[in-house]
Each structure stands twice: as structure tokens, then as C-alpha cells.
């Protein structure tokens, strides 16, 4: 065997020395990092979802949106059994997202939460955002007060507050900033105003000669009390006109700006906190609300209790949207119009079932609810603009006939047990000159099945009596105001 050459020996020695130095350097860096972790430098913690991490190993991001989310995920702390208490107690403001990997709404919420973290960091917000897998760390999650998914909680000096804002990135940012001491954004230049309008779709603008006085104080109080709308103030008329181009007067002014056909609405009452908040309640939502799982609570709990629902597929909605907006504008603050994608079973089916229309093949279904009177109505004519308008007018005036579900009228007058439906309840039961023994049943009722057999026997036994009708009605698909069933 030949001996190694001097050059090969020197190369090996150099390589060994290099590897040794790299190993020492690596260990030193690891030791420094560990020491910093022990000192609790939480701002340097990185929390990257396993999925995002895998994508990062697989190659570069393909879109700018993916880059934003990836960057944002790195500034959200991942809580666990070890660090949860330290993070909560060691920071003045912490917004925590409790999630579960199998929860669909958690999956929808995660990227929005990450983008919110990124947006807040750019504003210099002191708020720290953290998330915890409540399935993996149930004790830590339970100790924070997380009981469902997704759950958002704000911790201020270790004390939790329930989240009660909206669920878009813009709404999350607004709520977080208001709760951490920035209820109003002050704008002084046209350039920063243009940047503001690029980031906010809905906001309330106040123009004041000076930032003092009773009116201004009421404006500030309303800003603190409101959870959803970004308040912005200025004393510069040019800035105000960038925010609210419809501004006619250089005097003190207040108005809401929205990204829809009804873009500008001016406040025309005295500057009082409650009046400003009431103005927002009636004007913050679009003329036609598109129902989603995230905004459903906001829509249902609004001050307008007369609500018209339009069920249609997305393409059909595009065709009728302008018509709906025109009708909605005429009944603003009195009747709320809501669009529901008929293909979204979780949203549409519960409503359609109330009308017995869950299997309907109609392209457009229009229904209404009076949430104060707990009554429902159905537009049974074509949804033309004039029919829609008359339907809303009747709902407002209380002149519509309530809708009750009913199966088609059956032809069973000679049956041993007659079937009654909603449409025949008056004639067969209430107005009949004969005595009526009525069985009320439902297909899912276990006890009803046995009772129906006994009723059938009873009907056969008394078949010859001319003054007795034995009948049955399926209360799951038939309704009548006189038919009140508890069990």
C-alpha cells in the first residue's frame, strides 16, 4: 500500500481543523442562544407552523401572500405547558388564540391571526400575539380559560378579557389597538392619509378645529367604547377631503366611510357618545350583507330586527346584487337585506328547513324574519325588483301574512286515518262539524311509531262512526298557528 502524500496529509489536517472550529463555533452559538432563552427574551421566540416549516424546506414561496403569512407566523409565539405562564405574566398585553388542528374555523382563523400579528408589528403595537394547541396542551389551555375552538382572549397584566370584535384582519387589528391604548388614529398629512385609506375599508372620520372641547371628548369616548370601527381624526381640511371626498364644509364634521355603493354617510346629530355609537350600529354594515360563519353573530345581533334573506347561488347573486342594493337603500335602518349562498349547507339549510324548502330547486328564494315577533314570511311570487320592494314594505308595516310550512294537500278523504297538512288544518280540524282525534307525530320520534300502530287499530274499530274523524299530522313538516306542540 502506498503512503499518503504530504499534500493529502496537510489537506486532511486542514479539513479536520476546520470541522473542529465549526463544531466549537456551533456549540458556542447554541450555548448563547440557550442562555438568552433562559433570560426570557420572548421577543426572539419564533413560532412557525409545521406545515409552513415543511414548505420552507421544500422550496421558495410562490406568491407574495404566502411570504406575508410566513413572515407573520414567525412573530406569533407558540405556547405550550412550559412557557404559557411565563409569556402571559411577563408581558403587559398578550392576545392568545386557542385552536385545535381538526377545527375548520381554527384553520380559517390561523392565517388571519398571523397577518394581524404582522400588521400590528408594523404599527409598533406593544401587543404580543400567541397561540396554543388546546388539544395538545389541554391543561395549559384550560388554565387560560379556553373552552372552545377557536377562542381569542386578551390578557392585560395577566388578567383575561373576552374578545368581542370581528374576525377579518382589519377588525382584529382595530380591536387590538383600541384595547391597548390607541382608540383613535390622528392624521396630519395627505401622504400618510393615502397610506391609511389603502389599509382600511371602513372607518369613522372626525374633523376638528382643535383636539379639545366637549364635542371632541364625546368623540373620544365613543372611540373607546366601540370595538369594531377605526376612528380617525384630523384638523386639516385637505386630509379630511382625502378621507371623505363628499365633504362640503370646512367646519367640524363626522362621517363614516365604507367600501360599497353607499360609501359616505354623514353624522347629523349632536356630538354625544351614545348618539355616535347608535349611528355606527345602523351604518357600519353593508346595505346587503353576505352571510358567513364569521359574521353571522354580528348580523343576527344587530339593531335591525326585520331581516330579509335572499338565497341563491353565487353567480345568480352577481346578477341581482345591484337590485338588492337599491331595495336595501330604500329601507335602510328599517329592514336588513342578507344574502346566503344556497350551496353553503351550514348557512342556508337551517333557514330553508324552517320553510320546508331545503330540497327546493328555485334559483332564488326570498324569506323574511321578524325577530321581535318571532315570525317568518316567504315571498311566493317572482323576486322582481317591485315584488322585492313590496315584500320589504309589507314586512316593515306588518301587513304580510305569516308563513307556515305545509306538505302538498293529500287526496285521502276515504282513508281509515286521514292525513292532515298545514294547508288543510283549518278545514279538517278546526272547522269540521265532526269530532276529530288528531295524532301529532314526527318521523324521528321513536314513541310515535308504536302509537301510530295503535291509532290505526282504533280507527278500524270506530270506522262506522259518522261523527268521528281520526287523523294524523307530521308536525316536522307542517305548521299552523293553532298547532302548538311541546313534545
Image (spheres, rainbow, N blue to C red):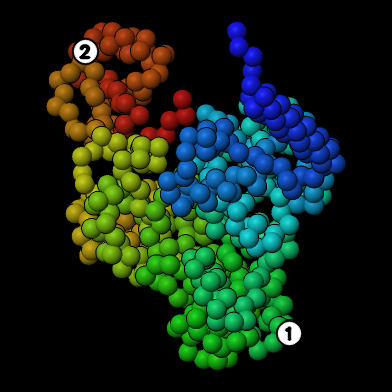
Q: Is residue 262 above or below residue 466?
A: below
* Dot 2 or dot 1, earlier in sequence: 1
Query: Which tag is nearer the camera, tag 2 or tag 1?
Result: 1
Q: Which SS class for mark 2?
A: loop
Residue 356 vs residue 17, the one in the foreground: 17
The residue lying at 47 percent from left, 51 percent from top is 65
The residue lying at 73 percent from left, 46 percent from top is 44
Q: Is residue 476 above or below residue 223?
A: above
Q: Do the residues under discs 2 and 1 have CB atoms within 8 angstroms? A: no
The numbered dot on residue 463 is 2
The residue lying at 39 percent from left, 53 percent from top is 290
Q: Position of residue 452 (x, y in %)?
A: 32, 13
- Few, some or many residues within 10 Å of mark 1 (<14, 14–19, 20+): few
Q: Position of residue 487 (x, y in %)?
A: 46, 25
Q: Is residue 282 left or right of residue 208?
A: left
Q: Residue tagged by mark 1?
A: 213
Amino acid at each position: 500500500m502506498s503512503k499518503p502524500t504530504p499534500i493529502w496529509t496537510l489537506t486532511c489536517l486542514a479539513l479536520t481543523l476546520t470541522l473542529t472550529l465549526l463544531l466549537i463555533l456551533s456549540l458556542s452559538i447554541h450555548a448563547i442562544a440557550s442562555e438568552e432563552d433562559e433570560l426570557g427574551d420572548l421577543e426572539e421566540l419564533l413560532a412557525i407552523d409545521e406545515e409552513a416549516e415543511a414548505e420552507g424546506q421544500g422550496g421558495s414561496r410562490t406568491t407574495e401572500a404566502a411570504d406575508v403569512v410566513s413572515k407573520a407566523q414567525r412573530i406569533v409565539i407558540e405556547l405550550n405547558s412550559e412557557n404559557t405562564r411565563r409569556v402571559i405574566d411577563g408581558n403587559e398585553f398578550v392576545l392568545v388564540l386557542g385552536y385545535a388542528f381538526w377545527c375548520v374555523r381554527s384553520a380559517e382563523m390561523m392565517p388571519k391571526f398571523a397577518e394581524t400579528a404582522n400588521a400590528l408589528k408594523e404599527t409598533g403595537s406593544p401587543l404580543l400575539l400567541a397561540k396554543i394547541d388546546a388539544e395538545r396542551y389541554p391543561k395549559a389551555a384550560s388554565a387560560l380559560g379556553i373552552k372552545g375552538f377557536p377562542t381569542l382572549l386578551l390578557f392585560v397584566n395577566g388578567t383575561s378579557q373576552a374578545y368581542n370584535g370581528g374576525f377579518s384582519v382589519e377588525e382584529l387589528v382595530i380591536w387590538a389597538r383600541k384595547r391597548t391604548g390607541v382608540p383613535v388614529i390622528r392624521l396630519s398629512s395627505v401622504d400618510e392619509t393615502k397610506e391609511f385609506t389603502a389599509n382600511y375599508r371602513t372607518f369613522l372620520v372626525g374633523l376638528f378645529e382643535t383636539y379639545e372641547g366637549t364635542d371632541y371628548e364625546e368623540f373620544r369616548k365613543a372611540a373607546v367604547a366601540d370595538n369594531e370601527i377605526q376612528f380617525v381624526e384630523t384638523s386639516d381640511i385637505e386630509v379630511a377631503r382625502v378621507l371623505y371626498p363628499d365633504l362640503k364644509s370646512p367646519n367640524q364634521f363626522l362621517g363614516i366611510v365604507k367600501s360599497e355603493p353607499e360609501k359616505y354617510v354623514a353624522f347629523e346629530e349632536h356630538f354625544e357618545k351614545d348618539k355616535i355609537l347608535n349611528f355606527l350600529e345602523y351604518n357600519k354594515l353593508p346595505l346587503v350583507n353576505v352571510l358567513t360563519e364569521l359574521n353571522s353573530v354580528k348580523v343576527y345581533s344587530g339593531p335591525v330586527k326585520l331581516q330579509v334573506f335572499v338565497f341563491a347561488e353565487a353567480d345568480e347573486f352577481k346578477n341581482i346584487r345591484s337590485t338588492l342594493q337599491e331595495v336595501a337603500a330604500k329601507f335602510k335602518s328599517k329592514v336588513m337585506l342578507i344574502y346566503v349562498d344556497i350551496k353553503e349547507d351550514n348557512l342556508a339549510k337551517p333557514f330553508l328547513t324552517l320553510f320546508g324548502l331545503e330540497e327546493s330547486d328555485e334559483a332564488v328564494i326570498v324569506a323574511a324574519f321578524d325577530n321581535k315577533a318571532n315570525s317568518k314570511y316567504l315571498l311566493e311570487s317572482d323576486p322582481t325588483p317591485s315584488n322585492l320592494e313590496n315584500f320589504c314594505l309589507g314586512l316593515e308595516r306588518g301587513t304580510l301574512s305569516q308563513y307556515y310550512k305545509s306538505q302538498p294537500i293529500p287526496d285521502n278523504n276515504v282513508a281509515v286515518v286521514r292525513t292532515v297538512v298545514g294547508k288543510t288544518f283549518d278545514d279538517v280540524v278546526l272547522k269540521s262539524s265532526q269530532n276529530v282525534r288528531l295524532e301529532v307525530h314526527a318521523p324521528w320520534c321513536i314513541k310515535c311509531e308504536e302509537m301510530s300502530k295503535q291509532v290505526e287499530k282504533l280507527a278500524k274499530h270506530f270506522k262506522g262512526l259518522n261523527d268521528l274523524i281520526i287523523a294524523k299530522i307530521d308536525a316536522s313538516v307542517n305548521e299552523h298557528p293553532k298547532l302548538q306542540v311541546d313534545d
